[in-house]
Image (cartoon, rainbow, N blue to C red):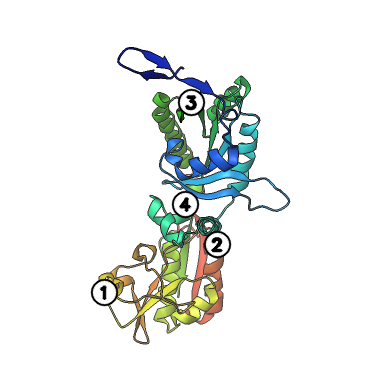
Amino acid sequence: MALYKYTNSELKAVKKNTMASLGIKERDDLQRVLRDNIDAVSPDTLIIAEEFSNWQDSNRRIDLLGVDTDGTLAVIELKRTEDGGHMDLQAIRYAAMISTLTFEQIVDAFSKYLKSLGQEADARILLTEHLDCEPEDMGSRTRIVLVSADYSSEITTAVLWLNEQGLNINCVRLVAYRDDESIYFDVQQIIPLPEASEYMVKVREKEVEIKAKRNRGMKAQFIVTYRGTKTQPLAKRHTMFFIVSKLIENKITPGDIQQLLGSNRFVYCEGTFSEIGEVESQIVYSLKQETPINFESHRFFNNSDELFHADGKTFLFSNQWGENTQNLAEKLIAGFPQVGLSIKNIILNEDPESE
């Protein structure tokens, strides 16, 4: 597709150029510009790392690593060549390698990236503000964005087939033009075609829904027994809250609970308050570090009946729980056997009375 400059008397063709002939370098120029203007090739994506490499025994580096608002990690690979090289295989390897990243590892990578840019912003806050999903769901999906001056038929054929098999790969063509002293980029998504993108998203969502229905019986929940009485099946966060609430009822302090949990799970403020709005107007501290924090109430149980009080302080307990929930729950139960708690991991549709 040619690019034309409109004048009153004619359409003048703008000369197409290779990036190499224009002196545009892959990393120093193209990568830097797209890093700071990523919406040009991947809208609604937050860049969290550049030249990312977080694995042993490998020198491979992801050009740009981003995250979408739904928590999907985006591997963005760039080539200034006319055929794309072997970037599809390279990107697939990278997508597999980042699929095991935890939320904390992602926060750490983003924090290092911000510091490399000379920014002092809080990586965790920026991430949670960007996300429309729970942090614990972040990274459960990956997708690939390939950006190149053009693609060989081998790459386009492979990408189309891989997308049919359930992968999520976009190919963006970036063609350079020069008009006098100005350089222009014609940016076009060629796979999937823009008019087919919405349809493909709906197809994937339908496949995910079918898979979820098929596997719904495999989703883990927990039944907690307290002095002979069983709860209904509880999700991870509610399991932990129930256990902690019973420990506190039995005079176990938040400090003692925090000590067993290890990572920071409680925050507090001085004074006894019954409403989250009152807590938000106070200086809030991390119980583990005993230092003031940027308090985000949505990350904690914050209803009036979910606040804990001890020693003239108001405590809030984290609602952010992931794969290690059962181990931590069992650790708390074993640490305070006198309370009389036990836990069982169940299948979601299992009848709790069938024991």
Q: Of callouts 1 and 2, which one flags the residue occurring earlier in the amino acid sequence?
A: 1
**Disc 1, SS:** helix
Label 3 or label 2, whichever lies nearer to me, is 3
Provide the residue designation for mark 1: 278
Q: CA distance from mark 4 to mark 3?
A: 44 Å
Depth check: give the residue in front, 247 or 62.
Answer: 62
- Residue 162, horizontal then vertical, whole percent: 57, 29
Task: Give the crowd class for mark 3: few <14, some 14-19, many >=20 residues within 10 Å.
Answer: some
Please give left or right for residue 20 compared with residue 141 in the image. right
Provide the residue designation for mark 2: 324
Label 3 or label 1, whichever lies nearer to me, is 3
Image marks 4 and 3: residues in contact by CB distance under 8 Å: no
Depth check: give the residue in front, 126 or 321.
Answer: 126
**Disc 4, SS:** helix
Label 1 or label 2, whichever lies nearer to me, is 1
- Residue 233, horizontal then vertical, whole percent: 43, 59
Q: Amino acid at mark 4?
A: Asp
Q: Amino acid at mark 3?
A: Arg
Q: CA distance from mark 1 to mark 2?
A: 32 Å
Classify 23 as above or below 54: above
Q: Of callouts 2 and 4, which one flags the residue occurring earlier in the amino acid sequence?
A: 4
Q: Amino acid at mark 1?
A: Glu
- Examine the rendering and report whether any part of residue 228 can be seen: no
Classify 333 as above or below 323: below
Image marks 3 and 2: residues in contact by CB distance under 8 Å: no
Q: Amino acid at mark 2?
A: Asn
Task: Give the crowd class for mark 2: few <14, some 14-19, many >=20 residues within 10 Å.
Answer: few
- Residue 247, horizontal then vertical, whole percent: 44, 78
Provide the residue designation for mark 3: 178
